[in-house]
Amino acid sequence: TDYPTLQASVIRAGDVTMMANRDLLLIGSLSRQPLLGAWSERTGLSVSNGEMHAVARNWWERLQLAFDWRNRRSHVEDVNAWLRGAQGGEGAMIAFRSPLNDQRSVVAITGTTSEQVAQTARMLQTNDRVAKVQDDLVLVRPDNVQSFRMSRRYDVGTLARWIWVRWNLSD
């Protein structure tokens, strides 16, 4: 948006409940950011031993997705194939609904190592790569950026009626 961030606060993971009424930006590697593991059920991913894996959907979630036109795309198999093909880990940007407040969002800039966290942050500074940021999971490699849909869409806030129609028909 080219607008500066105002009134930002830097806190430790243990103090996160004080920020329940704010959107959150988590920065850190998978092994050093404890909130990513604790909140992984919101992302469609599991984080263990510093690695990510897409979680297979159960039969009830697959049935719900069949009738939910906004959320039909799900890339569980694609994400796991991409992660298996990684040599030396991944950088990632993950967006999800806040577990502290359903009207707020969390964006995590993370990676297998701190170098991949920095690589993911640098990705946000290049226009050709930013254009590839489309869904709630973005995986970053030195030579490629890929976006995936992992969790159900959710709405926060309100839109004017004509913008709401356009937004819902855009996907």
Image (cartoon, rainbow, N blue to C red):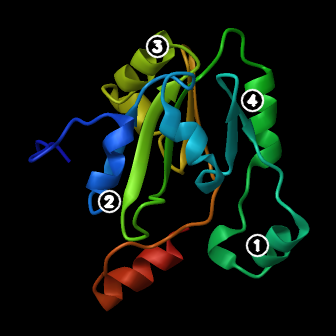
Residue at the location (63% across, 53% down)?
149
Give the Cα separation between the discs numbered 1 and 2: 29 Å
Q: Answer few, some or many: residues within 10 Å of disc 3's Cα (few below 14, many 20 plus, some between 14 and 19).
A: some
First in sequence: mark 2 or mark 4? 2
With 4 as the anchor, is 155 left or right in this view?
A: right
* Position in image of residue 82 (x %, y %): 74, 29
Give the Cα separation between the discs numbered 1 and 4: 23 Å
From the image, tell me which residue sits under label 1. 65
* Position in image of residue 46 (x %, y %): 70, 40
Above/below status of 137 relative to 126: below
Quarter of the image with the C terminus is bottom right
First in sequence: mark 1 or mark 4? 1
First in sequence: mark 1 or mark 2? 2
The reply to whether callout 3 and callout 4 are in contact (CB within 8 Å) is no
Whether residue 81 is visible: yes
* Position in image of residue 71 (x %, y %): 66, 69
In front: label 3 or label 2: 2
Q: Answer few, some or many: residues within 10 Å of disc 2's Cα (few below 14, many 20 plus, some between 14 and 19).
A: some
From the image, tell me which residue sits under label 3. 114
* Position in image of residue 37 (x %, y %): 60, 38
First in sequence: mark 3 or mark 2? 2
- Image-quadrant location for residue 21: bottom left
Label total for image? 4
Q: Answer few, some or many: residues within 10 Å of disc 4's Cα (few below 14, many 20 plus, some between 14 and 19).
A: few
